[in-house]
Amino acid sequence: MNEKLVEEEQSTTAPAQEILLGPFLGYVTSSTIRIWLHLEGGPPELWVTAHPGNPFAEPVAREPIKFDADRMFTGWTDLGALTPDTKYFYRFWTNPAASVPFAITGLTDDDLHFWTLSEDPDAQIDFVVMSCHNPTVAGKDGFDGHAIWADIPQIISRHSNRNVRFALLVGDQVYADEWQNRILREPAEEGRLKLYLEAYRLYWSNIYYRRVMCRLPAVMIWDDHDITDGWGSEEKSFEGDSPTFKPEWQGLFEAAFKTFCIMQASRNPPPLAENPRDGLDFAFRAGRWGFLFLDLRTNRNWRRSQLITEEQSGRIRAWVEANREAMSTLFVISPVVFSHGSPLLENYTVKAWPYVMWVVDKVAGMTRWGKGLQTRFWKSVGDIRDDIRDSWSSPENASQADAMLDYLFGLQNAKKDPVAVVVISGDIHTSGYANIYSSDPAHTSRPTIPHITSSSVSYTPFNWLLEAIYRHSSKTIQLGKKGSYSSQVSHHFTSRSVAVLSLRPMKIPGDFQLKVKYYLEGYPEPQTLIFDLEQTSHREDISWAAQERLFAREYAPTTSVNVDALLREKASAAPKDLNWQESIVDLMKLFGLDSGLDARKRLARAWGYEGKLEGSERMNLFLHREIIRRFIAAGGSVPGGLDALPTADSPSAATANASEAEPET
């Protein structure tokens, strides 16, 4: 068991009546299963047994499960020595001899079952992917917001899905946003923990939810709403202009972390970090398939342009290296997406969104119709600026996107023990898929990575009209700073949904097909996609000359620009060494432009910088990112706006350089 996930003691007051969540299933292998239960106000200890084939067969495993106040009255245990690829039922008892049953309210003996995994590396294996569970915003579906959950038992029991063995929950299993202000005001840690527990009890108590999670083993990673909306990207959570979180916000995070470790991470394999506070990333293998879960919230800091730390990346690489010989494909679970919309469009959206929200609230105060519009707006859209900042394609995360994609494309293009990569995400409340492309010559044998998104299972889906605008304007999306990577979003479905992924052996030994079925709310047949995991598609990169007449240059598909190579070539011809990768002053010198403070202030103002024009590190970082981004958009030419600046040897530049220093980043 993951005892190290449980931190120091917390105490709670016993309720007047029994409160039960679960039972829920966790990490499953060919011979073990983790069983989890939250029980307050009941017996302090129960025993759980496993029965092959039917609930009344002789038990083959028996373990105690305790409910202590220091673990929020939550217990979990592993049942072992099970037979591979076998259906088991499990039951609870109040005594060690397993003679006095404990009734699980709302569930029957037939509900409590699971399958162990097969040991055959060539056997078909299916799994479910879902994210974004907030039924409170869609309560008029006849199932208290749980219409998809009510249908999942029917979906996974179909003959075509008979090999479903587990689920990946890829973020936002609860929405703690509504508790945010109360938690921030609460001075005591015990009080903050109680408030988070209140959120979990609300979201996990529904009978349709429990009927799925009691029979479908699941592992999970957190995203922002498991903490609060926009954690790590929310401006008001920081101290002034610094990257330090305010004390009350840090207290909120610590309470969310402890609660998550007990309520969710306790069902997972052990984290890769010795100390979970350094990162909750975890990984496991099921036969030849690897599953790597990225924790993009524990160390998330927008002000530091940080989704993940170097230490986390190092542990991830170490696990992959230790397992790569046994893996043919690695599923990388990233709670946030690599791409959804054009960076240019999303930059405009971030700037304009405060005015959009102001208009919606203004209209709401005028008419009854406006009030309904406001309710629908906040339920289906809301403030999306932090969601845009969170994606890998955000300019703030460009360097880390390059580093991650360098590693993943390098992994599947390695000469020795190459491993195919598939990215799985949630978060954006619209399901679908994209392809991530590399133009790096080192990646020509496998230049694409499928990017599959499954969201949301119960939250109101992303507005169909806004999604249509995104798809119309975002033909291709540039990823990273150096110009090697791009993405093409192919399909998105604006319906609540759940995805079933199926790994199916083909006729050629060792060749597998990935079949993805999206079960969309209200549709009788799933939307189906098929990927060949051994042979990824090659790049065609059609330029579509007519596109220039139809769309702005920024939205038209163009050949990817290898920024790093072009600028290195330019730097090699410079009279002295320039640190253009980090210094805005040297980058502007590389273009032969005035890099003085006045010139940088004028450029920052012209390009919409909203901070103080004082040559700060933040202003310089903004300019550096903008120049690189515009250089890519201009196809490797001098970006628009730079050509109007004085050159380094002009009289005005000389005067500016003589009159004030040039603070560098």
Image (cartoon, helix red, strand yellow):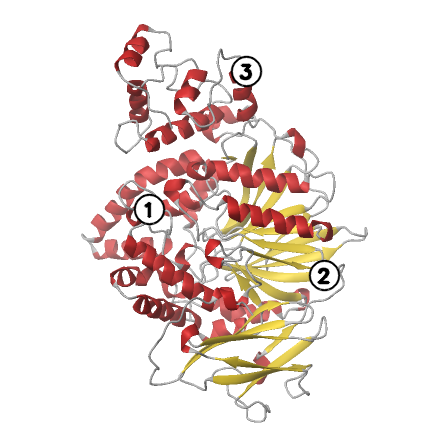
Q: Inspect the image, locate mark 2, and give the three-letter code of the amino acid beneath it.
A: Gln
Q: Which residue is mark 2?
A: 124
Residue nearest the observer in this picture, 76 or 472: 76
Q: Residue at x 48, y 49 (%)?
A: 336
Residue nearest the observer in this picture, 376 or 223: 223
Number of numbered discs present?
A: 3
Residue nearest the observer in this picture, 398 or 67: 67
Query: SS at mark 2?
Result: loop
Mark sitting on residue 244: 1
Q: Which residue is mark 3?
A: 572
Q: Residues within 10 Å of mark 2 (few under 14, many from 20)?
A: some
Query: SS at mark 3?
Result: helix
Q: Are marks 1 and 3 in contact (CB under 8 Å)?
A: no
Whole-angstrom CA distance, mark 2 to mark 3, is: 53 Å
Q: Nearer the viewer, mark 2 or mark 3?
A: 3
Q: Inspect the image, locate mark 3, and give the three-letter code of the amino acid beneath it.
A: Ser
> Nearer the N terminus, badge 2 or badge 1?
2
Whole-angstrom CA distance, mark 2 to mark 1, is: 48 Å
Q: Residue at x 35, y 68 (%)?
A: 193
Q: Is residue 87 left or right of residue 491?
A: right
